[in-house]
Image: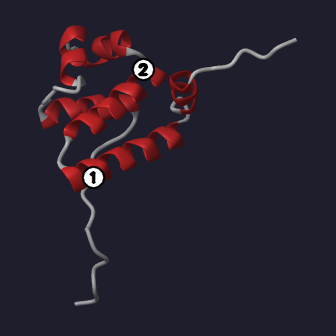
């Protein structure tokens, strides 16, 4: 009996069903954006988490946003508003937060 080999995307999507794995994945993607200013990688990561956890159709229903607009917003050329990113994250069970870049010294 041979075991079917799964492709990389299937494995990643399966792992992203785990909320803590998805959170870590999004945090790394956001750190990449902070370093290089390229939003496409973060949008791809967010799209992957959406696909793994609920899918675009369900997200569109939950957020009241148009499914095609969601696909466009999360495309490599997407430039979604902060409100849209926040709404998507909220519906996935996450939120944006602000943290200090460096450890705060005891002033």
- Residue positioned most to the right: 1
Q: In the figure, 106 relative to 22: above or below?
A: below
Which quadrant of the view contains residue 92?
Answer: top left
| SS under mark 1 | loop
In x, y percent, where is residue 11? Answer: 58, 27
| Residue shown at 63% from the left, 20% from the top | 6
- Residue positioned most to the bottom: 107
Question: 37 or 104: nearer the eye?
Answer: 37
How far apart, in angstroms, are the residues tagged by discs 1 and 2?
23 Å
Left or right placement of residue 24 versus residue 33 in this view:
right
Which quadrant of the view contains residue 107?
Answer: bottom left
| Residue shown at 20% from the left, 42% from the top | 38
In x, y percent, where is residue 82? Answer: 14, 37
Q: Depth-wise, is mark 1 or mark 2 nearer the camera?
A: 2
Residue bearing mark 1: 97
In x, y percent, where is residue 85? Answer: 22, 33
- Say whether disc 1 or disc 2 marks the residue closer to the N-terminus: 2
Q: In the figure, 39 relative to 77: above or below?
A: below
In x, y percent, where is residue 89? Answer: 31, 34
Left or right placement of residue 99 versus residue 2 in this view:
left
Q: In the figure, 59 relative to 46: above or below?
A: above
Residue bearing mark 2: 51
């Amino acid at each position: 009996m041979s075991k079917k080999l799964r492709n990389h995307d299937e494995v990643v999507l399966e792992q992203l069903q785990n909320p803590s794995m998805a959170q870590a994945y999004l945090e790394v993607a956001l750190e990449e954006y902070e370093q290089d200013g390229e939003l496409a990688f973060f949008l791809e990561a967010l799209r992957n988490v959406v696909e793994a956890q609920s899918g675009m159709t369900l997200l569109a229903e939950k957020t009241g946003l148009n499914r095609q607009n969601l696909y466009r917003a999360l495309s490599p050329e997407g430039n979604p508003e902060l409100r849209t990113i926040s709404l998507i994250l909220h519906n996935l069970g996450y939120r944006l937060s602000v943290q200090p870049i460096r450890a705060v010294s005891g002033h």
